[in-house]
Image (cartoon, helix red, strand yellow):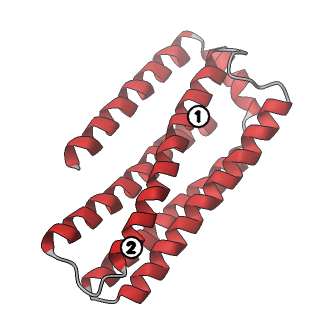
Amino acid sequence: MWVFLFGDLTLFAVFFVLYLAYRAKERDLFLVAQQNLNPGAGFVNTLLLLTSSLFVVLAMRDIRRLRPRAATRMIAAAFLGGLGFVIVKFFEYRSELTHGFVPDINDFAACYYLLTGFHLFHLVLGMGVLVFLSTRARLPRLTARQLAVVEGGACFWHLVDLLWIILFPLLYLAK
């Protein structure tokens, strides 16, 4: 799991460096194009993911304390945070696209849709991981191996959160 997480972080790091290189080359275009984004939606999504990660932490605590019912509720709450993110991003994309902010309009839009789309893919994958974690959390007791798998899944969810914490200011707020 750590190799996978490190590989994912490396891939996103390459994307971030490429984004910053394009931004440095076309600073004025990026600043103007950035005005098409809705920082309020980005902020709401940040809160949703931070809260969702907190629920995953609480679920892990409950799993270790052998409280499967409480852990399952925490994972369900984390899942709802992820679902909320997807819904906000759907409406944000819809608004941007209907106002002509499409991926091929300029380099900023291409980077924005690539980065946020790839993150969204990871988030949906993470929601699947949360569903799996929920099945494990229902067990009255986990073996050491099962607990390691659950912790790895929780780490993946935190990676999704971490990536958004970088993406949000990079895309929406950087001047």
Q: Quadrant of residue 72?
A: bottom left
Q: Residue 174: x percent and y percent? A: 58, 34
> Where is 25 relative to 1, above or below?
above
> Where is 165 relative to 8, above or below?
below
Left or right of 161 in this view: 62: left
Question: Mark 2, residues whose alpha carbon is within 10 Å: few (<14), some, or many (≥20)?
Answer: few
Tell me, yes or no, whether the two marked residues, 1 and 2, touch with CB atoms within 8 Å.
no
**At numbered mark 1, what does the secondary structure look like: helix, strand or loop?**
helix
Callout 2 amino acid: Thr
Residue 171 got which mark? 1
> Where is 145 relative to 39, above or below?
below
**At numbered mark 2, what does the secondary structure look like: helix, strand or loop?**
helix
Alpha-carbon span between mark 1 and mark 2: 36 Å
The first of marks 1 and 2 along the sequence is: 2
Tell us which disc is closer to us: 1 or 2. Answer: 2
Residue 107 got which mark? none
Give the residue at x 47% y 42%. 166
Q: Residue 26: x percent and y percent? A: 60, 12
Q: In which quarter of the image is residue 134?
A: bottom left
Residue farthest to the right, as pictured: 99
Disc 2: which residue: 135
> Where is 144 relative to 94, above or below?
below
Give the residue at x 38% y 50%. 159
